[in-house]
Image (spheres, rainbow, N blue to C red):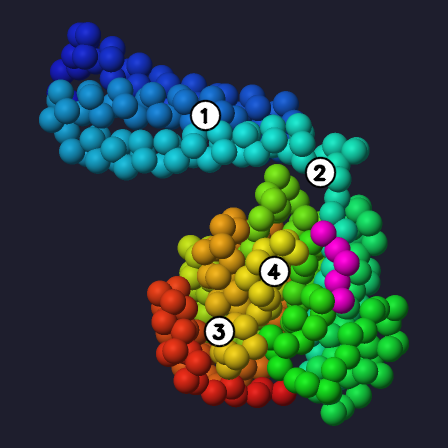
Amino acid sequence: MFPEMRWDAWELFGLLGEGLFFARMLAQWLASEKVKKPVIPILYWYFSLAGAVILVIYALHIGSFAVLIPQVVGILFYWRGLRLEYIYRRSERRRRESGPDRPDHPWPKISVIVPVHNEEKTLADTLSPLLEQTYPGPKPEIIAALNGCSDNSRGVAARFPVKMAESGKSGMSFGKNLGAVAATGDMLVFVDADTRLPKNGLGLLAEAVVGKKRYIGTVAGMPDKGGPVVRIAFAAANLATRRRRAHAPGGVMLMDPETFAGIGGFDESLPQGTSTDCIWRGLREGAEYVFVDSFRAVTSIRRFEKTGVVRQMLDWRKNHKALSANRREEVEAKGYDNVR
């Protein structure tokens, strides 16, 4: 009924591979019991990788695709898992040696610039969490950059203990530049007036630039409302931005003052794609790109509601391609669609 079992050197070799897989489960179980929660120790990846290599060799010997293919695929996953473990350990070591876990860590003074143009409906929801930050460093400087407001935005901002920079001229880029000129911090963070940060957001931003002198970047975003299509659009935007498509899906940007001065701030002549343009110019000037995904900035989908999700995503993509290739004239010819 069953084929006769063989006991030779190759069978023992195959059993060694299976034994390593058993050993990885045993290592994981013991490590989890020790801390009373599920964990994956580094031995899990070593045993898995070694067992898979042995079984690949064994499968080639006996000529079994059923054994071979899963182990070949497994090697890729186990190697990646081991690689991620080493990346994490290296990051944690750097954090212990020079990072924010040290009691003498030099937390930067952060200036948060909120460009405000007729944002009386959303401004309070943006400023409130900024003033409730659990930032361990110097008290953040919050600047409301009021530009060309004809509503009660100034009255809303006046209810909060924030610094105000004002001008009758309007424009998103102008507002950001206006606030940056008034800033005194070691780190500039630009937050759209329809965007909310978690209470530990500024601390996570500061951690993301530890050890970096020149940097520019943005933050992962999530919609304040909307269904599956909107969530998928944000997920796609986050993925693209991680790969240096250089958009600001979360309505947040960060950079050091030296980089800001070096590129001359935001280009006020561009009607669209100003964040993308600023990031690409910063990268060309030698700044290091930073994409922060340790939290999600919650931002309004009002532009999606007015323009349409697909149309807006395609338009952003066109801007990305043009600005990354330094074809600025393609974006300069466009107009600006006010969604307020």
Nearest to N terminus: mark 3 or mark 2: 2
Mark 4, secondary structure of its residue: helix
Please tell me which residue lies in front, 92 or 264.
264
Nearest to N terminus: mark 3 or mark 4: 4
Place residue 324 in its image quadrant.
bottom left
Which residue type carries mark 3? Answer: Gly
**Label ID, residue 260:** 4
Which stretch is magenta?
182-186
Camera-nearest label, 2 or 4: 4
Place residue 18 in its image quadrant.
top left
Residue that label 1 marks: 44
Mark 3, secondary structure of its residue: loop
| Residue beneath the point at 58% across and 82% down | 302
Give x and y (percent) for residue 153. 78, 83
Please tell me which residue lies in front, 220 or 233.
220
Magenta stretch holds residue 127: no
How far, Cα to Cα, is label 3 from label 2? Answer: 34 Å
| Residue beneath the point at 13% across and 22% down | 62
Which residue type carries mark 2? Answer: Pro
How far, Cα to Cα, is label 3 from label 4? Answer: 17 Å
**Label ID, residue 168:** none
Sort mark 2 into few (<14), some (14-19) or many (20+) by Cα contacts within 10 Å: many
Residue that label 3 marks: 273
Nearest to N terminus: mark 1 or mark 3: 1
